Image (tube, helix red, strand yellow):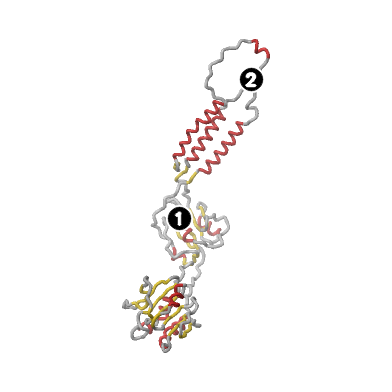
Amino acid sequence: MTPLLLAPLGLAALAALVVPLAIHLRRRTEEVPVDFAALRWLDPLPRPRRRLRFDEWLLLALRLLLVAGLALLLAQPAVLGWESDRPQVLVAPGIDAAAARAVAGPDAEVRWIAAGFPGIDTAMPEAPGEVSSLIRQFDAELPEGAPLAILVPPVLAGVDAAPLRLTRKATWRIVGDAEPIRPPAPAVPALAVRHAAGQERALRWFRAAAGAWSDAPQFDAATGDALPPRSRVLVWLTPGRVPAAVTDWVSEGGTALLGPEAELAMPAASTALWRDEAGRTLVEGGPVGAGRLMRFTHPLEPAVMPELLAGDFAASLRDLLAPPAPPPARVAATAFAPAGGTPPFPLPPRPLSAWLAVVIALLFLAERWLATRRGRFAA
């Protein structure tokens, strides 16, 4: 370990050591004189020359140590290199503690992957928490050469979408029997088509797509300007100027897909959202307020847009309209093994102020006991 001072200017307070010295010389142990009658018949002797004399050395030493300790406390002492180089083992919640201890061995320090990294002897955490972030934190707080092993179940919960990269090559061990992971079903949009009279021909593409998404399709079509709830996707096929009510509906969190004949200025942040194999933009759009506004760039005719007849049209339309899928929270542990290579983080020094404060308190109590003990001022 390497000692250091975080605020070395605090040692300037050592100049206060002259204070207890001066007080000690000024207020030495008093000797109370006792007069008796015969003394007045004696001739006074010459007063002896005063000499510098220290008494009660222990009390003086305690007072000097007390002042020096306060000066050292102001300098904020700390140590570097205090970290243990024992093998560290992290255990994900869900693994039996006895099994984890048996795998880790007697020399390793075993902790749960939980806030505060409690020891394996404590109760298992109820929730997995943010496993990825906790592993990264524990790795960053370890010294550079400390070995690290991580015990996880076959299916790991509480992970984020970013790959797990650490500052060291950690041992990744899977404990327990594997269980299948079922991918979440894709979100199914609910369509509300608004069209002009005589445009029923274009409805068939959206009705067919809704039927392909679910056995009980959520689809309705009507003429007019009545807007659906914002939980549904508005497909606006009416040609001409788009009413302001539609853009307000989108700004408040709705999702709208306009037909190619809709007249509306697209958002400045519009990008190509769907392209064909040749690279042509089929749908463009971008955010408007809290919602999304999109528009077909080609007429909804198979001769112009052959993708309408493609087998993946329904899936492509669903991926366009459905909200973004949340990042995975459960992954197969074999696919989430960490990689090394991240630069190590400099570890902060450990402050010793708390321990020094305890020592100062003990010195103060000892000084008070010596200074006020019975018999100190005896004649």
| Quadrant (top left, top right, bottom left, bottom right) of the N terminus | top left
Check the picture and name the quadrant holding the C terminus: top right
User: Which amino acid lies under the numbered mark 1 shown in the image of this protein?
Assistant: Asp
Label located before the other in sequence (2 or 1): 2
Q: Is residue 239 above or below residue 376?
A: below
| Up/down of 170 relative to 210, above or below | above
Q: How crowded is mark 1: few (under 14 residues within 10 Å), some or many (20 or more)?
A: many
- Residue that badge 2 annotates: 33
Side (left or right) of 134 relative to 39: left
Q: Left or right: 56 with respect to 302?
A: right
Left or right of 53: which side holds 242?
left
Q: Residue furthest bottom?
A: 198
Q: Residue at x 47, y 55 (%)?
A: 138
Secondary structure, mark 2, is loop
Q: Mark 1 points at which residue?
A: 139
Give the residue type that dot 2 points to.
Pro
> Given this view, does label 2 or label 1 mark the residue nearer the observer?
2
Q: Where is residue 274 in the image (x, y as percent from the top left)?
A: 37, 76
Q: Nearest the camera: 251 or 98?
A: 251
x%, y% of residue 219? 48, 83
| Image mark for residue 351 | none
Task: Depth check: give the residue in front, 269 or 212.
Answer: 269
Based on the displayed image, in which of its 4 quarters is residue 268 positioned?
bottom left
Where residue 279 sits, quadrant-wise, is: bottom left
* Residue drawn at x 48%, y 50% as measured from the top left: 86
From this viewpoint, is residue 345 visible? yes
Residue lying at 67% horizontally and 15% vertically, measured from the top left: 36
SS label for mark 1: helix
For the residues bearing labels 2 and 1, Cβ distance under 8 angstroms: no
- Residue 174 on image: x %, y %: 48, 63
Instruction: Tell which of 199 and 141 is nearer to you.
Output: 199
